[in-house]
Amino acid sequence: MQILLVEDDHALAQGLVQALSEQGLSVNHLNQGRLAITAVEAALPDMLILDLGLPDMDGIAVLKAIRKVSADLPILLLTARATIEDKVVGLDQGADDYLAKPFDVAELLARIRTFERRASTFKHAALTLKNVSLDTAGHKAFVNGDSISLSRREYMLLKVLIENVDRVQTKDSLEAKLYSWGDEVASNTIEVHIHHLRKKLPIDFITTLRGIGYIINSS
């Protein structure tokens, strides 16, 4: 899951990036609202965690701008504004959930898991393809009903490909979905993951389009 965290408190942001990364989540961090809008316009994350108290513009204005880009992007607000009126304003402007500061990381992780379950329910049919299926709650994969052992990155890669069945995924797009901006990624990293995945999946389940990327076809 690719998360965009927009938070200007450096210490809090670094702590959240570390905690979420330890849970297998890819997290990119920005500290300004305008940068967040530009980033979402360029490439939608799977989820946005947005602080309302940003230095360059009000978080509600950022929320409104991002909702014009995507009506479906899951957005969780983080803020010290904890009154009922503040919560209502945020939710009315398109936020999906609200977490008041200070909060426990365990509670944030629980909220993120809720978003993941909603997304998995929405895409349930796409997560079972031919004789391969994914248990998104348990992060497990099965072939013909038998569990196969996948690394975290292999699982994430397979999930992205199945969710985008019949759509080509370039190497660059896969790297963007699997890794955070600051991660060091070797030039052949995706190829290596694909190589290992192919050993565990049915023959020709993943198709390589040389010089373009990878695709899983529904037929």
Image: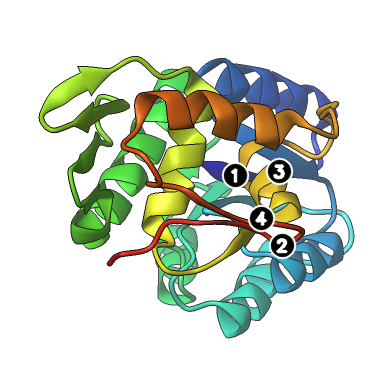
Q: Position of residue 106 (x, y in %)?
A: 41, 19
Q: Residue furthest left?
A: 145
Q: Earlier in the sequence, mark 4 or mark 1?
A: 1
Q: What crowding class fits label 1: few (fewer than 14 Cα within 10 Å), some (14-19), or many (20 or more)? A: many
Q: Is residue 172 above or below residue 168?
A: above
The residue where tag 4 is placed is 52
Q: Is residue 102 above or below residue 40?
A: above
The residue where tag 3 is placed is 175
Q: Earlier in the sequence, mark 3 or mark 4?
A: 4
Tell me the kind of residue under disc 2: Ile
Looking at the image, which residue is at 70% across and 57% down? 210
The residue where tag 2 is placed is 212
Looking at the image, which residue is at 77% across and 59% down? 211
Compute the Cα span from label 2 to label 1: 26 Å
Q: Nearer the viewer, mark 2 or mark 1?
A: 2
Is residue 190 among the parts visible in the rendering?
yes
Looking at the image, which residue is at 30% across and 65% down? 218
Q: Earlier in the sequence, mark 3 or mark 1?
A: 1
Task: Please identify the quadrant where the C terminus is shown.
Answer: bottom left
Q: Is residue 1 above or below residue 35?
A: above
Compute the Cα span from label 3 to label 1: 14 Å
Dot 2: what SS? loop
The residue where tag 1 is placed is 3
Tell me the kind of residue under disc 4: Leu
Q: Earlier in the sequence, mark 2 or mark 1?
A: 1
Q: Earlier in the sequence, mark 2 or mark 4?
A: 4
Q: Is residue 31 above or below residue 9?
A: below
The image quarter in which residue 194 lies: top right
Compute the Cα span from label 3 to label 4: 29 Å
Q: What crowding class fits label 3: few (fewer than 14 Cα within 10 Å), some (14-19), or many (20 or more)? A: some
Q: Nearer the viewer, mark 3 or mark 4?
A: 3
Q: Position of residue 151 (x, y in %)?
A: 48, 17
